[in-house]
Image (cartoon, grey):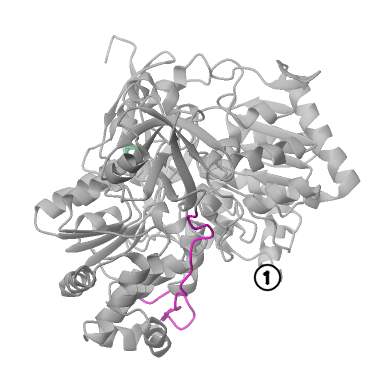
């Protein structure tokens, strides 16, 4: 590019948690394109990016970007100076804190923001606002994964790496539309399957990855514990389990065997619609393989019994002896680019400080007090769904939302709208005037990943550098700078010259990040936690030397059978499930402003099985109304046998035709608080 004034900045993709590396090519502030790279320490993505990586950057230069703060005057959001906007932020939160106490305040961090920004957001909540109410959108995607893995193996994270996923001898993938949601990861799996690995997919929807499977089994939505326990029962009954591994490494085998006993093949067929011969062939394929990877995503986690679903997967993997060795293990495919770091590692959780340390422990609080100058609150705060309920009850009155769009991502968005309107004071910090920003009292314009300095942690626990390739537009600022200034205006004495300083502080407080610094990342590329000191090379797969419990042994935690919170009836006879498409990301805030993506899938749709469509008199491509007890949307019908009879699918990305106008918000997993997005009752009618 010499002589053409083109710069190349090496950074990490800001979409999904595969964490592909690429160069962003810019001329001034114009992004010209990206080129995949494969530097030292990158995930094993084989020089790839998907279509989102290639074209998804276009949002950065969108005319819709917020370039000035907005404040509400006489009911309308109007441009304001940073001074006025930040004065209002401080006044608004201080007034509520003085009148109702700090528990009347809450903050949502973001799995899209960097680790350093998430660390500051939870510090702002706990150390400055003095509220324990800090959470993030991971509550809505993999909180059930974290709850289950903490109980069974000890860390709430993927036990292995993308390299291990690429090298497995067999896979069980369930509830993951890997091809569309984690495209580069799916490519590695498909390459390996072409080379001879066995792929077994259980899913209510025949997703793209299922097209490559040796066995695809369609399941009834909401009954995953049945078939997973059925597989475990089959394995034990036929002596296919790894008895030596279980004896040496896992507690609770007898209780597990007793709990799975009722899940006979006939009972699994009755509950989950899985034919006995398919249950048997899947069990035998998995038991025969040397190294098995168990992959899942939100099709498994977003249920009112999501934690039980993941416990059942973990039990199956442990009984087969498949955790703690290369090319095997438990692989929750996380969603956002930084959901591992921003979604949990940084302490943006109501019951965990950075590094998953417990605020109820006085010794832990003392460690934080040494650095912060004050102890964090000892009590646990509210989870995201509880914050919305508390807003309607008047218990939470002020909310600070960074980089999230709950007005579209919450289940039952009518309920979310009411809760946002009930707040006395709402601050939204984002790139665009989102559906959530429309409810705000103050909107702060933020920088995108292409304009930010810091780190992301991908799905395999790999911390990687994010570097600014262009300036943020207008007066937009990095979340890091905004949070630092908000804290200063509250009188806090934070001492960070840069995100690198914040990472040093994180390393001092979160032992799993103890050996990670920007200097090291710049020199060595990515580092996978646990990385406990400057000499630690990081950890490709967990539990080689024992599980994360004092005695080093994992735990079988039997999974109890749950049923969906809502079942079809005469008024709403169909089951709705939701998900993603390749060309969009979450609430579409970014991808719908990327012309290279949005022209592929410009609008929402509903997938309907041909038999269901015929019974309703619905033709392919006609507009239909999909209605639930909570709301209705009009979308285009796509008649396909990707879904089973009686099941319909709507993607989550579109404000017009919003899937979450239909989903239920009042049925949540009691352990993790994750709502039941994946099973709601609806009807479809012609319009
Ligand atoms: Fe980005 Fe994920 Fe696509 Fe890689 S697979 S380019 S991380 S969206």
Viewer-closest of 349 and 87: 349
- With respect to residue 39, does 590 lie above or below? above
* Residue at position x 62%, y 32% in the image: 436
- Classify residue 433 as left or right of residue 88: left
Q: Main secondary structure of the magenta part?
A: loop
Visible in this render: residue 560? yes
Q: Quadrant of ligand 1?
A: top left
Q: What is the secondary structure assignment of the residue under circle 1?
A: loop
Residue 497: x and y in percent read 61, 36
> Which residue occupies 53% across, 41% down?
660
Q: Which residues are magenta?
A: 543-569
Q: Residue at x 80, y 38 (%)?
A: 93
Work out whether 58 lies above or below 40: above
Residue at the right extreme of this rendering: 99
Quarter of the rendering containing residue 235: bottom left
Of 563 and 404, the residue lying toward us: 563
């Amino acid at each position: 590019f010499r002589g053409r004034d083109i710069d190349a900045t090496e950074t990490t993709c800001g979409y999904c948690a595969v964490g592909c590396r690429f160069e962003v090519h810019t001329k001034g502030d114009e992004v010209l394109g990206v080129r995949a790279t494969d530097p030292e320490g990158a995930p094993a993505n084989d020089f790839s990016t998907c279509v989102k990586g290639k074209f998804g950057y276009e949002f950065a230069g969108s005319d819709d970007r917020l370039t000035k703060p907005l404040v509400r005057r006489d009911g309308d959001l109007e441009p304001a100076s940073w001074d006025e906007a930040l004065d209002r932020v401080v006044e608004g939160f201080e007034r509520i804190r003085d009148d109702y106490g700090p528990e009347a305040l809450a903050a949502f961090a973001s799995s899209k923001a960097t680790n350093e920004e998430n660390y500051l957001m939870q510090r702002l909540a706990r150390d400055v606002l003095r509220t324990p109410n800090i959470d993030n959108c991971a509550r809505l995607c993999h909180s059930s994964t974290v709850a289950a893995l903490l109980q069974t193996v000890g860390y709430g994270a993927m036990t292995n790496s993308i390299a291990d996923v690429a090298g497995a001898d067999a896979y069980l993938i369930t509830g993951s539309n890997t091809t569309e949601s984690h495209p580069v990861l799916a490519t590695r799996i498909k390459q390996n399957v072409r080379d001879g690995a066995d792929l077994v997919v259980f899913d209510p929807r025949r997703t793209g990855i299922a097209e490559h499977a040796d066995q695809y089994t369609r399941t009834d939505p909401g009954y995953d514990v049945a078939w997973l326990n059925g597989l475990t029962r089959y394995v034990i009954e036929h002596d296919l389990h790894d008895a030596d591994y279980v004896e040496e490494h896992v507690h609770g085998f007898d209780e597990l065997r007793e709990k799975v006993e009722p899940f006979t093949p006939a009972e699994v067929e009755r509950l989950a619609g899985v034919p006995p011969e398919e249950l048997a062939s899947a069990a035998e394929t998995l038991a025969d393989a040397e190294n098995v990877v168990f992959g899942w995503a939100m099709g498994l986690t977003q249920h009112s019994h999501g934690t039980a679903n993941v416990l059942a997967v973990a039990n199956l993997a442990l009984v087969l002896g498949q955790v703690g060795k290369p090319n095997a293990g438990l692989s929750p495919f996380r969603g956002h680019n930084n959901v591992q770091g921003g979604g949990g590692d940084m302490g943006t959780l109501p019951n965990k400080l950075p590094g998953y340390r417990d605020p109820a422990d006085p010794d832990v609080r003392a460690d934080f007090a040494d650095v912060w100058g004050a102890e964090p609150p000892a009590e646990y705060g509210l989870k995201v769904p509880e914050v919305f309920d508390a807003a309607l009850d008047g218990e939470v009155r002020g909310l600070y939302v960074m980089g999230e769009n709950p007005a579209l991502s919450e289940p039952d968005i009518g309920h979310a709208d009411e809760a946002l309107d009930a707040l006395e004071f709402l601050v939204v910090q984002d790139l665009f005037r989102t559906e959530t920003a429309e409810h705000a009292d103050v909107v702060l314009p933020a920088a995108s990943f292409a304009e930010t300095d810091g780190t992301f942690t991908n799905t395999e626990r790999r911390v990687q550098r994010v570097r600014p390739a262009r300036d943020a537009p207008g007066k937009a600022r990095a979340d890091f700078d905004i949070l630092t200034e908000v804290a200063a205006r509250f009188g806090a004495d934070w001492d960070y010259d840069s995100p690198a300083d914040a990472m040093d502080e994180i390393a001092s407080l979160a032992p799993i990040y103890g050996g990670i610094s920007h200097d090291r990342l710049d020199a060595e590329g990515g580092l996978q936690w646990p990385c406990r000191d400057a000499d630690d090379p990081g950890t490709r797969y967990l539990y080689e030397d024992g599980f994360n419990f004092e005695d080093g042994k994992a735990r079988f935690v039997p999974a109890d059978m749950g049923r969906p919170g809502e079942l079809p009836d005469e008024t709403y006879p169909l089951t709705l499930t939701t998900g993603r498409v390749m060309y969009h990301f979450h609430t579409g805030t970014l991808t719908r402003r990327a012309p290279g993506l949005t022209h592929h899938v410009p609008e929402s749709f509903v997938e309907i099985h041909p038999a269901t469509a015929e019974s309703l008199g619905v033709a392919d491509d006609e507009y239909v109304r999909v209605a639930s007890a909570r709301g209705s949307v009009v979308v285009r019908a796509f008649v396909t046998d990707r879904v089973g009879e009686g099941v319909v699918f709507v993607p989550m990305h579109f404000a017009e035709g919003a899937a979450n106008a239909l989903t239920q918000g009042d049925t949540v997993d009691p352990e993790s608080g994750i709502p039941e997005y994946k099973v709601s009752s609806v009807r479809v009618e012609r319009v």
